[in-house]
Image (spheres, grey):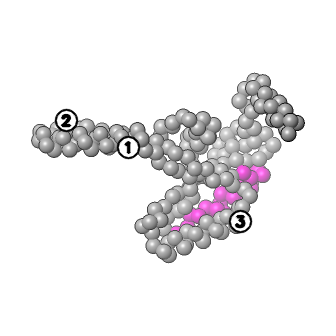
Amino acid sequence: MGIHNRSFKEKWLALFEKENTSEVLPMARYVEDNFYLYDDGTVMDIMQIVAKDLQNCSEQDITYDFAKHWKFHKLNADEYKIIALNFPCDLTEQKKYWKKKIETTKNPYLKNWQKRTLAQLEWLEKNRTKREFFLMFFTENAAAHKEFILRNLQIMATGQEPLLKECDFGRKEQILYKMANQNMNIQR
């Protein structure tokens, strides 16, 4: 047991001796084709899983979506990881609307209710988060990456509502930042 602890400690100390982040993280660069390329040629990408309200779905929709998820997992069992992240609620537009309503309302009773609504929105923005799910996947090269995306968008994006969608560069950066700095809040 002492040998394992020493090797772990040595590895841990070696991380602090690195000069910069690129020596610790293996990602070489972000490619214009909207994915990350590692030093060894491996490709990493992130897509968003679209969550659905299962309480208000019909039994047929739930069964159909389950079949799509099952087929996706059967084809890609070892190539992906599901990430769940909490993001703060952004209610600035709603707060701006209620502030304007409060300024223009002359009825004191109605103004009191509007102030209460604004306080509730501020509480929600401060104390609530929105849980979002992402799919991080790895492929051997750029051609396999393109094939992975096309194949899985055909599976998951069929039907009335897609269950999987691509993320833009800014969103991927937010996700990676949140994963590396879990105690930080990200603004949308």
Q: Position of residue 65 (x, y in %)?
A: 55, 68
Give the number of marks.
Answer: 3
One can see residue 173 in this view: no
User: Are dots 1 and 3 in contact, CB under 8 Å?
Assistant: no
Query: Where residue 103 is drawn, which disc sits there?
Result: 2
At a point 27% along the width and 44% down the height, the residue shown is 117
Quadrant where the N terminus is found in the figure: top right
Q: Residues within 10 Å of mark 3 (few under 14, many from 20)?
A: few
Query: Where residue 77 is drawn, which disc sits there?
Result: none
The residue lying toward the viewer, choosing from 38 and 64, is 64
The residue lying toward the viewer, choosing from 112 and 105, is 112
* Residue carrying label 1: 124
Q: Amino acid at mark 2?
A: Glu
Query: Where residue 75 is drawn, which disc sits there?
Result: 3
Q: Amino acid at mark 1?
A: Leu
Q: Is residue 112 above or below residue 53?
A: above
Q: Position of residue 151 (x, y in %)?
A: 66, 63
